Amino acid sequence: MGRPKALWKLGHSCLGTGMMLETLLIIGLLGWASCQESQTMTLEEKTTIRHQIIEMFDHAYGSYMKHAYPADELMPLSCRGRVRGQEPNRGDIDDSLGKFSLTLIDTLDTLVVLNKLDEFEDAVRKAVRDVRFDNDVVVSVFETNIRVLGGLLGGHVMADLLRQRGERMQWYRDELLHMATELGHRLLPAFNTTSGLPYPKVNLRYGVFNPLSRTGTESDTCTACAGTMILEFAALSRLSGESVFEEHARKALDVLWKKRQKGSDLVGTVINIHNGEWIRRESGVGAGIDSYYEYLMKAYILLGDHVFLQRFNTHYSAIMKYISQPPLLLNVHMHNPTVSIRSWMDSLLAFFPGLQVLRGDLKPAIETHEMLYQVTKQHKFLPEAFTTEFRVHWGQHLLRPEFAESTYYLYKATGDPYYLRVGQSIVEKLNAYARVPCGFAAVQDVRTGTHEDRMDSFFLAEMFKYLYLMFSEKSQLPIDIDDYIFTTEAHLLPVSLSITRAPIQPNITEAVPASQDDDLFTHSCPSTETLFPNNPSFAKTIRDSYKYLTGVGRAFNSLPVREIELPFHDNVMEPVEFLKSMGISLTSLTEMTVGDAKNQKEQKGVFRVKLFAEVRQTPEEEEVVPHAVQLISPPFLGRTVLTAGPAKFGMDLTKQEHGVKGRIVKVSPYNACGPVENAAELKDCIALAVRGDCMFAAKARWLQQAGAIGVIFIDHREGSNSEETPLFQMVGDGDSTEDITLPLVFLFSREGAVLTAALEEHHNVDVLLLPQDRQLGHDKTQKPISMNIKLRLTEEGELEEKAAKGPTLEFVLENEEVLSEEELGGNRQVCSRAAEDGRTELCSADSTRSLNPDTEPDVHP
């Protein structure tokens, strides 16, 4: 996320540059800094934290350069670089890696913002000398665009600025721009589709359709993947003079706009790149859609094209109508948006309050941000996904910067030092819980604090920019930050491009009809004086409603009575009595206490309903039944049992008496996100597939169609294991999953490695999928068995030949039902004495025992 020129300069629009002022209405001006709370921060404190941020950056960047460069990323636990093909495959995560020193390029303009100009010049020299793009590697078009192309453009803009100042970079001859142009041409084959929507992947050397490309079979892409190209591609066109890049990016946005659901003005998450049909109709502001909305707003700011603002405003109205449930942002179905379709949110939506600040909609931005802050206070970091009750849904935290980004925006928009304290907490938690000797490590699970061996490039590209800018004064920066807009990867593009003549025909995008429902701020920047008149502490007032949203930090108090006024008519006795019979008490407003007199309404027949709620402690997590993958073929013979997680859809293995048995076959392609190439081999076998690239439900449908009888998914996150990471249940894709009837289980990567190693060594491996407590050979706890024991006294002559002489008790065990207490006469048991006359008498002997059926009792004749 980024901000336009002079976003918070008095007298300038929050939506654009000075070139656009004639089209904008300035509603009011206010010095934001007047909003102060008790959490003020001195200049000395800000300086200390700023120096701390620089030290943290030096630790992270220095570790990458020392231990990883020229690799794409640092593995902070292993203290070495991650080179694609030399480390275990992580699925789609590795599509960000292209053997082009990703972290170096992604960090270039961060070095300038942090005033590390010597390091910047050295980094540019290294990039020009070492980085090449003619690599036979398949990469994500989206990730390569925002990280590498954006990084090269941001680096070029900074290098050109320093060169023009005459103090540095005098040797620079636009090498980074030439590299960006070359990379842009290598991405262009992805746009060769009938719709204009790009393929999700491209081979940097062979493109898409070359037989050697190993890609081009994909049919779907995410909305954000297709809609997050316009800033980088338009900037490249305007800096290089080649129009082809901006043309393709505009066309992709046109397609997405035309394919929106006309009734709701929402878009789905995944779309077919050939026919434009929606594959996943789930609509939200998080993963899969997020930066599409962001780039509509920022394309207007960067390029000055009002069509993009009009489209954004149309979508934004729909978001606030259907998705926004302050402080929550919940996904809905694009065709039926009045009902939320899932009860959890992902961490990527944390960018949205920042986008709302750009739009000037501060109140919901403050509300959602405060909710997110409360979640971080409860779990230290934002989990990758969390429920509407703020419990962990997916525990991973990848050091994502979106929460810091929105915190930065809100501080700049309000001047409220509260947000400096939020930023300080981010800094402290990163140092306390993510710092390791060789950099900063992602958190595998916020509940356990275990680390993951990854430090994504966006941590250096974004996190340190936002944190440093938050604690810096403008005079302390080497550039005027108001002259730039941030891309979604926080790369800096000059807003002066809005006055650079586009090398394409103007107005090629579809115009948007003016909306009758536009609010006052659709084309203007509101001030807090307009939004919150006579309320300098407006931000605190809004936040206070959500201060204890998750329960953290709140002292226990009984809940106050919640009151609802119900207008009844004169003849109210019947409904009153009916409600009383349901346990609801009603009090007439005229019978209220004197202290409430000021709130009384002189309305006849109006009653106040008192509702009392009982607070009950709910379990922290939904119970997950552990499953198992048991290797039963030789040489394992059931001795190797791997702990697995279940799925919330597909066959319920807990209801299968003997589980599901079959031979395992590795799927081709391994991610199972498309037609199965080895369907004949897979038929009537259990499929082995890796997590990633698409939803579990999509994989399951492809594998079921291929004839598999079960599926084992293996985690693509290196080092994950069931001992350190809590099990979870796989969920569907938001649509109905009743068509999926396969049993599905999930193995973490360490357990998965055991299974794949067994398959490689023995080729034919049979497994059993079942609940863990039903595995073969598992010792089951036997319930005690109660039996009646009849005692019979025998005469000496009746004894067997070798028996001892004298009266003897003979125990005869009969597997009969235990008599009821009524039959036993209290605690007494039936004791039969067989005499010559066959009489039966009641005895007081206790003849009930708990016996292990595997152990024979001693019988003495």
Image: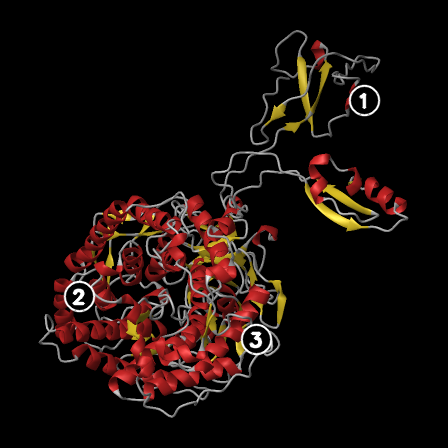
In the visual, does 384 lie left or right of 519?
A: left
To which residue does mark 1 refer?
Answer: 822
> Which residue shows up at 38% across the image and 45% down it?
724
Q: Quadrant of residue 694?
A: bottom left
How far apart, in angstroms, are the residues tagged by discs 3 and 1?
72 Å
- Mark number displayed over residue 454: none
Mark 2 or mark 1, earlier in chain: 2
Pointer 3: residues within 10 angstroms few (<14), some, or many (20+)? some
For the C terminus, give its image quadrant.
top right
Check contact, mark 3 vs mark 1: CB within 8 A: no
> Which residue shows up at 67% across the image and 13% down it?
809
Pointer 2: residues within 10 angstroms few (<14), some, or many (20+)? many
Q: Is residue 503 visible?
A: yes
**291 up-or-down from 570: above or below:** below
Which is nearer the eye, 415 or 342? 415
Q: How is the image coloured?
A: secondary structure
For the N terminus, give its image quadrant.
bottom left
Mark 2 or mark 3, earlier in chain: 2
